[in-house]
Image: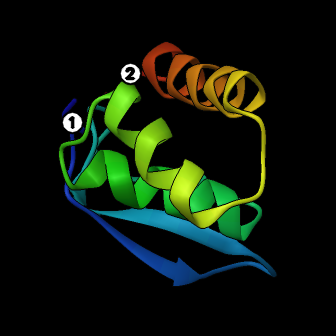
Amino acid sequence: MKLKYDFEITDFMSGVCAVSKQPGESGKKVIVRLGNGTAVRMFTLIQEGNEIPDIVSTMLKEYDVEEAVLRGEVERFVAILQKDNIV
């Protein structure tokens, strides 16, 4: 999976965000509010080029969560990024 832009993860506006290093289609930088450490981890794994099965596999080793629950969360997160034309 590939992100459409190159992002830098940073503290921004009272939370953690991914901010594109280049302007998006609107001519402005793209900002993705990540909200928590789990979202940051998912975003980082996507940024590294991982696909959903790889993200789930990696995160299962790092988090105490059932595979089905994690897979659903990852799929929802990716769907939001797809809807917003980020991947």
Residue 54 image-quadrant placement: top left
Q: According to the image, label 1 marks what residue?
A: 4
Q: Is residue 23 left or right of residue 34?
A: left
Task: Judge whether 27 appears above or below 9 on screen.
Answer: above
Q: According to the image, label 2 marks what residue?
A: 85
Q: Residues within 10 Å of mark 2 (few under 14, many from 20)?
A: few
Q: Residue at x 68, y 70 (%)?
A: 37
Frontmost residue, 60 versus 42? 60
Q: Position of residue 56 (x, y in %)?
A: 49, 37
Under circle 1, the secondary element is loop
Q: Residue at x 21, y 55 (%)?
A: 48
Examine the rendering and report whether any part of residue 21 can be seen.
yes
For marks 1 and 2 on the same chain, the one whose residue lies earlier in the sequence: 1
Residue 55 image-quadrant placement: top left
Task: Judge whether 32 appears above or below 3 on screen.
Answer: below
Instruction: Specify the amino acid type for callout 2.
Output: Asn
Q: Is residue 32 left or right of residue 16?
A: left
Under circle 2, the secondary element is loop
From mark 1 to mark 2, how far is it between C-alphas? Answer: 8 Å
* Pointers 1 and 2 in contact (C-beta within 8 Å): yes
Examine the rendering and report whether any part of residue 31 can be seen.
no
Q: Quadrant of the N terminus?
A: top left
Q: Position of residue 32 (x, y in %)?
A: 55, 51
Q: How is the image coloured?
A: rainbow
Q: Quadrant of the C terminus?
A: top left
Instruction: Specify the amino acid type for callout 1.
Output: Lys
Q: Position of residue 2 (x, y in %)?
A: 19, 34
Q: Residue at x 77, y 36 (%)?
A: 66
